[in-house]
Amino acid sequence: MKLNIAVLAGDGIGPEIVAQAQKVINAVATKFNHEISYTPALVGATAIDQVGDPYPEATHQICMDSDAVLFGAIGDPKFDNDPKAKVRPEQGLLAMRKKLGLYANIRPVATFPSLLDKSPLRKDIVEGADLLVVRELTGGIYFGEKGRSEDLKKAFDTCTYTTDEIERILKLAFAYAAKRNKRLTIVDKANVLATSRLWRETAQAMEPDYKDIEVDYMFVDNAAMQLIQWPKKFDVMVTENMFGDILSDEASVITGSLGLLPSASVGVHTSVFEPIHGSYPQAAGKNIANPVATVLSAAMLLESFDLLEEAELIRQAVNKSLEQGIVTEDISKEKPYKTSQVGDWLASYITG
Ligand code: IPM
Ligand code: MN
């Protein structure tokens, strides 16, 4: 197969971790005879510094013209510490999601058998946990009207959802549940929010079309508690943009490191594959960041083109590396490997 991949490495550790994912994709391409080409493009703080725009039009065109996007991370503390900054790296990520129509973010969370003791949660709680967070990605409070009053003493962010937006994400979540263990938890705050009540109403109207799926509704505060108390209760969890952002970071605790979790953002145009973690600026350039989340995002990328054997081999390589302790310092303080060493090890495992 021929694939054109846009590479948006972004900020902080982005370039280092993306480079490892590319090594792994190249190894798979060699082994299975695929032809992969990469087109790098600017995004985030790097793009602001170079062209003054966190998601330049040229980058958007490259994404639109590619088969998939491999994304690193964005964010830079020099913007976080300046509340008055007019352009922010995060706006680049949000603009990309909106312009590519990426309304669904798929975040699988499963424990790795060899890392059960890395979770701060008890082994009997996390062992065998395997869930999927489906996060709505182009609506809600992230994209609603926002602003400040003239005297600057009031600020507001509005949460808005339409039935169409809710229906399309729920449809996808039902489909994932059908492929998995046929349980769907819809997370909202319907006891307080009008948007949540619309989510619930829409979901209830859809339920009869999915009779084999067991649906339950849970308030987000309760879900936050149950997720770490009984993670095995969950199969597919679907929720709005901000709740999904928060719950998926929380869910990473189950696996032991935020550096392990991949994601796929899918929708209308080109899909984007990215780790769920951020740009980890403290580690930038030090060759210490965990590349596994990005490598597993590359596996999701290949899977989206039905390259199932290829994706499985990447996951097998990752599992082997974790078992054998070929891991970065977030997982092993005693004998940490460098980012690039993990990438090299995974690539040579794959080529055999
Ligand atoms: C994520 C990130 C982003 C988000 C930030 C960087 C804007 O936290 O992808 O989860 O909140 O969506
Ligand atoms: Mn997040």
Image (tube, helix red, strand yellow):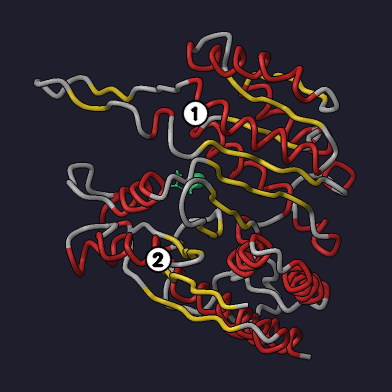
Answer few, some or many: residues within 10 Å of disc 1's Cα (few below 14, many 20 plus, some between 14 and 19).
some
Asked whether disc 2 touches disc 1, contact meaning CB atoms under 8 Å apart, the reply is no
Please name which of the two marks, 2 or 1, marks the residue nearer to the observer. Answer: 2
The residue that appears at 27% across and 27% down in the rendered structure is 146
Rendered image quadrant of residue 46: bottom left
Q: Locate the C terminus by quadrant.
A: bottom right
Residue 18 location in percent, x, y?
Answer: 51, 73
Residue 101 location in percent, x, y?
Answer: 43, 45
Residue kind at label 2, given as amino acid type: Asp
The residue that appears at 83% across and 22% down in the rendered structure is 211
Residue kind at label 1, given as amino acid type: Glu
Q: Which mark is residue 165?
A: 1
Q: Is mark 2 within 8 Å of ligand 1?
A: no
Alpha carbons under labels 2 and 1: distance apart:
25 Å
Q: Is residue 53 above or below residue 308?
A: above
Which residue is denoted by mark 2 in the rendering? 65
Rendered image quadrant of residue 160: top left
209 on left or right of 288:
right
